[in-house]
């Protein structure tokens, strides 16, 4: 992983942590089960999207290093 990619990933991790913290606060203050369930699902989907973006970035980095395989 290049230095730029490490910085990008760190930024993405910070964004994910920040987003999860905001959602956790909303879960703590939610008063009904439906809202809590939706917020938990949103949190899980955001984490999954973050994982997929990281994997896609890795694939693009690989293609950049080995563009003959495009």
Image (cartoon, rainbow, N blue to C red):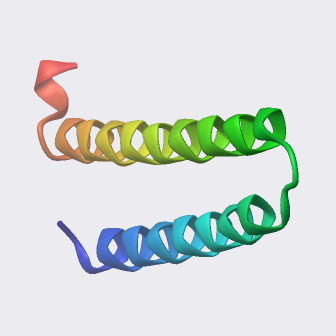
Where does the N terminus fall, quadrant-wise?
bottom left
4 horizontally vs 28: left or right: left
5 horizontally vs 31: left or right: left
The residue under the point 80% across, 63% down is 26
Q: Is residue 27 above or below residue 40?
A: below
Between 69 and 7, the residue placed more toward the observer is: 7
Between 41 and 12, the residue placed more toward the observer is: 41
The residue under the point 63% across, 73% down is 21
Q: Is residue 24 above or below residue 46?
A: below
48 horizontally vs 33: left or right: left
Q: Quadrant of residue 46?
A: top right
The residue under the point 41% across, 77% down is 10
Between 5 and 26, the residue placed more toward the observer is: 26
The residue under the point 22% across, 35% down is 63
Where does the C terminus fall, quadrant-wise?
top left
- Name the outermost residue toward the top: 70
Residue 54 % position (x, y) = 36, 48
Residue 31 % position (x, y) = 87, 53
Q: Tally the numbered discs.
A: 0
Residue 33 % position (x, y) = 77, 38
Q: Is residue 35 above or below residue 18?
A: above
Q: Quadrant of residue 69?
A: top left
């Amino acid at each position: 992983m290049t230095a730029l990619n490490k910085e990008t990933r760190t930024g993405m991790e910070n964004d994910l942590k920040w987003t999860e913290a905001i959602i956790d606060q909303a879960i703590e203050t939610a008063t009904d089960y439906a809202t809590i369930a939706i917020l938990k699902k949103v949190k899980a989907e955001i984490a999954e999207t973050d994982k997929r973006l990281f994997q896609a970035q890795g694939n693009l980095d690989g293609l950049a290093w080995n563009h003959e395989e495009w």
